[in-house]
Amino acid sequence: MGLTVLSGPSGVGKGTVVAAVRERHPEVWVSVSATTRAPRPGETDGVEYHFVDAEEFARMVKAGEFVEHAMFAGHAYGTPRGPLRERLAAGVPCLLEIELLGARQVRSAMPDARFVFLAPPTFEELVRRLTGRGTESPEVIARRLDRARIELAAETEFDHVVVNDDVRAAAARLVALMIGS
Ligand SMILES: Nc1nc2c(ncn2[C@@H]2O[C@H](COP(=O)(O)OP(=O)(O)O)[C@@H](O)[C@H]2O)c(=O)[nH]1
Ligand SMILES: Nc1ncnc2c1ncn2[C@@H]1O[C@H](COP(=O)(O)OP(=O)(O)O)[C@@H](O)[C@H]1O
């Protein structure tokens, strides 16, 4: 099974590590999720996410177009089924970067997938990273920290834990788990 699911608390560096994987490992295909949240500065529709409105998201859910979908901090996120199915059928190593509830749905639907938890070196460092990104209001940061505590407690559900101490090292460890070193 060529599918790897990467999860971990908000701010741990999932997006950063996945960007490093994209840059250095073009042989890995990274799924582009749909979301109802607004693009952040520098994000492009179709690259980091497909940015859709709530109506379009609901239509996609109803049409069965998602492998999994979940709410996170007030917005909907989902993994489109078609592109993933095509890449898996072609034998391409595939990576999903999704939150815990979605990872659990994938675990039920595709139990042969590999589940990797990206962990912060310490909780204090997680708070620093989440605050330091500067893209969220204090209310949003507080909500994400509440969710982060829940996500950290689920670490033991995963097959592997990669500590994001150094971005390049963490990306290399993730790819080694996916395709061997
Ligand atoms: N279930 C699910 N979660 C997703 C999907 N895409 C992204 N996420 C997760 O949604 C959460 C919020 O993502 P985002 O708004 O980009 O914030 P960030 O991860 O803190 O930069 C993160 O935990 C992502 O891993 C998806 O398709 N399905
Ligand atoms: N290994 C690392 N060391 C230091 N800072 C990091 C590391 N990985 C990510 N960061 C920083 O932490 C913040 C959150 O990273 P991000 O990739 O947005 O997290 P996530 O996608 O998990 O929410 C960003 O400011 C990012 O530059």
Image: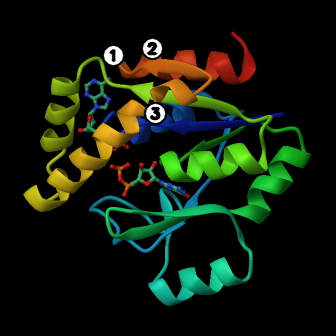
First-in-chain label (2 vs 3):
3
Residue carrying label 1: 165
Query: Spatial distance from mark 2 to mark 1, Cα to Cα?
Result: 8 Å
Rendered location of residue 134, percent (x, y): 14, 49
* Quarter of the C terminus within the rendering: top right
Residue carrying label 3: 154
Query: Spatial distance from mark 2 to mark 3, Cα to Cα?
Result: 23 Å
Mark 3 and mark 1 in contact? Answer it, CB < 8 Å.
no
Badge 2 density bin: few <14, some 14–19, many ≥20, Cα 10 Å: some
Rendered location of residue 140, percent (x, y): 18, 59
Look at the image and tell me whether residue 61 can be seen: yes
Q: Is residue 122 above or below residue 92?
A: above
Badge 3 density bin: few <14, some 14–19, many ≥20, Cα 10 Å: some
Q: Which mark is residue 107?
A: none
- The outermost residue toward the top is 181
Residue carrying label 2: 169
| Amino acid marked by disc 1 | Asp
* Quarter of the N terminus within the rendering: top right
Front one among 144 and 46: 144
First-in-chain label (3 vs 1):
3
Mark 2 and mark 1 in contact? Answer it, CB < 8 Å.
yes
Rendered location of residue 164, percent (x, y): 38, 21
Residue sitting at x 32%, y 24% = 120
Q: Secondary structure at mark 2?
A: helix
Q: Is residue 128 above or below residue 87?
A: above
